[in-house]
Image (cartoon, helix red, strand yellow):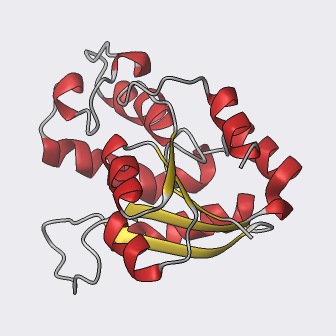
Amino acid sequence: MITIAWDVDDVLNDLTSVWLQKHWRPAHPACRTAYRDLRANPPHALIGAGLDEYLESLDEFRRNRYLSDLQPLPEALAFFERNGDRYRHIALTAVPLRYAPVSAGWVLRYFGRWIRSFNFVPSRRPDESLPEYDASKQEFLSWWGKASVLVDDHAGNVESARKAGVQAVLMPRPWNGGPDALEETFRKLESL
């Protein structure tokens, strides 16, 4: 059976869009940057922030609003409802260690019928000292050896997964130039 490894943020949900609209822009009314204009990720320079300020804001959103404000991407939920039992599924995300339980809880709340394994590569924060088992999703996938497909919004992760011998699907987002619409991306997954 094919095993699909799913990135969580901006693949199963719209984290960056919701964070920008509900958290960043209300706190920074001078920021006029629209979600569609985020041509880089991380988008700190595009929103007029330093990297540390951006990460602190994103972490604050994760701490205070992630579980209450973030809904599943309708296209993702529809895909799972139609096809969830045709594949095995795992979550493979990059999130700070302190927010991994929040992310895992969100995944299980909305996709736990299908996603039975939550895995993460810690997104480093300056005040954390962690053992480094895997520095990237590619290293995790190479070590784990069971994923057939990775679905991710980061073009670099898609490219490195392919180098590791894993099929990869790029979730279209403003920062990655993904060629397909969301619906088309999920149709491609259905044809596996």
Q: Is residue 117 above or below residue 93?
A: below
Residue 20 in which image quadrant? top left
Task: Name the residue located 43 percent from the left edge and 37 percent from the top edge.
Answer: 16
Residue 58 coordinates in the image, percent (x, y):
34, 47
Name the foreground residue: 103 vs 4. Answer: 4
Residue 4 in which image quadrant? bottom right
Name the foreground residue: 164 vs 4. Answer: 164
Q: Is residue 46 left or right of residue 64?
A: left
Residue 18 coordinates in the image, percent (x, y):
50, 34
Task: Tell me how many marks there are.
Answer: 0
Name the foreground residue: 174 vs 142. Answer: 142
* Quadrant in which the N terminus appears: bottom right
**Does the rendering let one see residue 160?**
yes
Task: Name the residue located 42 percent from the left edge and 22 percent from the top edge.
Answer: 35
Task: Name the residue located 43 percent from the left edge and 71 percent from the top edge.
Answer: 141
Task: Name the residue located 35 percent from the left edge and 70 percent from the top edge.
Answer: 121
**Does the rendering let one see residue 96?**
no
Q: Is residue 70 above or below residue 148?
A: above
Q: Is residue 144 left or right of residue 129?
A: right
Q: Is residue 48 above or below residue 115?
A: above
Name the foreground residue: 154 vs 15. Answer: 154
Residue 85 coordinates in the image, percent (x, y):
85, 63
Q: Is residue 27 above or below residue 69?
A: above
